[in-house]
Image (tube, grey):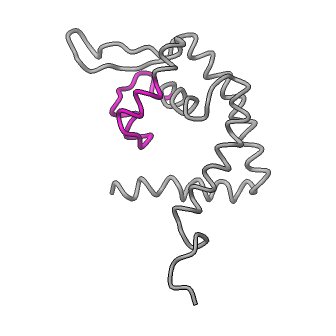
Amino acid sequence: MKKHSSVTTCNCFAIRQAARFVSQLYERHYAKAGVTAAQFSLLAFIAEAGKTGMSEISEAMVMDRTTLVRALKPLERDGYVISEPEGKGSRKLLLRLSAKGETKFLEGVECWRAAQAEYAALVGAERADDLRQMLLAIPAGAAA
């Protein structure tokens, strides 16, 4: 009898395996818009916020600041995201989408819809919704 755990009983293994599978599905769709899933998530968060700071994005995305800065660089370089001081003399930078970024975001939305539909077809719409709600509750519950 085995005394050690099997990967099939490991929560981390199961979540990471599923995350890789789902990421590959979405990446295939986002490639049509020329963005990655991570880049689209950032564009979507910024689009929804209008203007937002690094700490708000970092907290929402559960990303450390260094990783976030690296993820934002290509979006800023390509002119999709603009950073500007919060106010006169402020050191805090706020991020917003440029007109080009809004266009890229809308392009990505079409890809997102297709990816969402494919995922729902694979796992079932109700199961997809239930799983999403459970996953979103994990970081929310950890913060409480």
- Quadrant placement of the N terminus: bottom right
Whole-percent x, y for residue 73 in the image = 46, 21
Choose between 32 and 102: the one closer to the eye.
Answer: 32
Figure label count: 0
Residue at figure coordinates x 40%, y 58% from the top left: 141
The residue positioned farthest toward the left in the image shown: 89
Choose between 80 and 46: the one closer to the eye.
Answer: 80
- Where are the magenta residues, as a range? 48-72
Whole-percent x, y for residue 26 in the image = 68, 39
Using residue 109 as the reference point, say whether residue 10 is left or right of it: left
Q: Is residue 91 above or below residue 54?
A: above
Using residue 10 as the reference point, say whether residue 20 is left or right of it: right
Using residue 81 as the reference point, say whether residue 119 is left or right of it: right
The residue positioned farthest toward the bottom in the image shown: 1
Residue at figure coordinates x 50%, y 28% from the top left: 48
Q: Is residue 127 above or below residue 25?
A: below
Whole-percent x, y for residue 11 in the image = 53, 66
Q: Is residue 1 above or below residue 116?
A: below
Residue 88, quarter of picture: top left
Residue at figure coordinates x 62%, y 59% from the top left: 130
Q: Is 69 a magenta residue?
A: yes
Using residue 127 as the reference point, say whether residue 55 is left or right of it: left
Residue at figure coordinates x 59%, y 53% from the top left: 132
Whole-percent x, y for residue 81 in the image = 48, 17
Magenta span main SS: helix
Q: Is 2 a magenta residue?
A: no
- Quadrant placement of the C terminus: bottom left
